[in-house]
Amino acid sequence: MSTPIKNSHIVTASYFLAAFALLLVMHQGLLAALFSGLLVYSLVQMLAPRLGGKLVGQKGKVAAVALLSGLIVIILFALVWGSIAFFRSDVGRLSVLLQKMADILEATRSQIPGWIAAYIPVDAEALRTMITGWLHSHALEARTMGSEAGRILAHILIGMIIGAMAGLYDTTTTRVYQPLAKALHERMIALHASFRNVVFAQVRIAAINAVLTGIYLIVILPLAGIDLPLRKTMVVVTFIVGLLPVIGNLISNTILVVIALSHSVHVALSSLVFMMVIHKLEYFLNAKIIGSHINARTWELLTAMLVMESIFGIPGVIAAPVFYAYVKKELMDRGLV
């Protein structure tokens, strides 16, 4: 009887250590490193078996997986760097987008029905205050993130390298773990599975949303003789903010409708209707993709994001879907929910 009790204590200890590790990640600003590492690890785990199965010999498999891991790191870091370069350019700079939105609202205020205009800021400065109000409440945090962009990039690169090394190790070696190490490894596997399910599913949803938005902005509207400004920027922003469940849709909708006002109120209303139809379709996608993977409903994710934002700010919003999925998976595996 002593062995099961001892093992139970070891498993309990592994839960406390896992919770402490995640709190440490949030407190020390290591979320970028954790997520980048998990992303590379997931890709290596997914692609390595397909590559390794075609090779003969352990050394050949190790070399192939190492090459694959390095290639994944290079590609992902290039994408991160390219995204940063895009948003620093004149085409993609977010400050240009916000200023354009402010100018459009100020110029078209007289065309908007009074009952709607009552809820719209009276000038560009008021709009900027409204849009950045949430960020103003985290002003110190936002400035810290901006001033430490190089540090965050370094964390992302280091996290990718660690994820590649872990993926290489797990796909090319077989190890017998001691009890505590085994329990901690199970916690990491559960976290990895939750990250993979949430992130890969949300990437699909964000990509579908961005493609449909791109078709509307770049194909449908020009065919109707309507050319809106900053179309490419809006498509890119739609994809990036779409990686955040629910909230991302609200952000992208607001941007599209305001920019559409630069042409006319009718185009803005048509754009709003179009986005509403798209998001109705996305409810089915969310139910099928997100719900089937982590068994989480929209209200659950929103609650988790609200709580995490109140504790950790912006990083909490980003971490909430993955951390919530992980906690729920652990509880479901234990038969508690």
Image (spheres, helix red, strand yellow):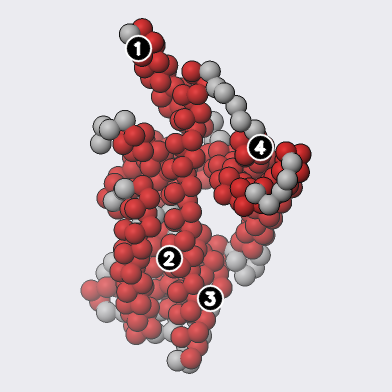
Q: Residue flagged by tag 2: what amino acid is it?
A: Ser
| Marked residue nearer the N-terminal end (1 or 3) | 1
Using the numbered discs, state the Cα–Cα distance from disc 4 to disc 1 in whole angstroms. Answer: 34 Å
Q: How many C-alpha atoms fall within 10 Å of the one at disc 1: few (<14), some, or many (≥20)?
A: few
Using the numbered discs, state the Cα–Cα distance from disc 1 to disc 3 in whole angstroms. Answer: 61 Å
Using the numbered discs, state the Cα–Cα distance from disc 1 to disc 2 in whole angstroms. Answer: 52 Å
For label 1, the residue is 5
The image shows residue 139, relative to residue 231, as above or below, that is above
Tell me which residue sits at (49%, 35%) in the image. 189
Of badges 3 and 4, the one in the foreground is 4
Position of 59 with respect to 246 (left or right) is: right
Quadrant where the C terminus sits is: top left
**269 or 47, which is in the foreground?**
47
Q: Secondary structure at mark 1?
A: helix
The image shows residue 325, relative to residue 124, as above or below, that is above
Using the numbered discs, state the Cα–Cα distance from disc 2 to disc 3 in whole angstroms. Answer: 12 Å
For label 2, the residue is 252
For label 3, the residue is 231
Tell which residue pokes out farthest to the left in this image: 115
Q: Secondary structure at mark 4?
A: helix
Q: How many C-alpha atoms fall within 10 Å of the one at disc 4: few (<14), some, or many (≥20)?
A: some
For label 4, the residue is 172
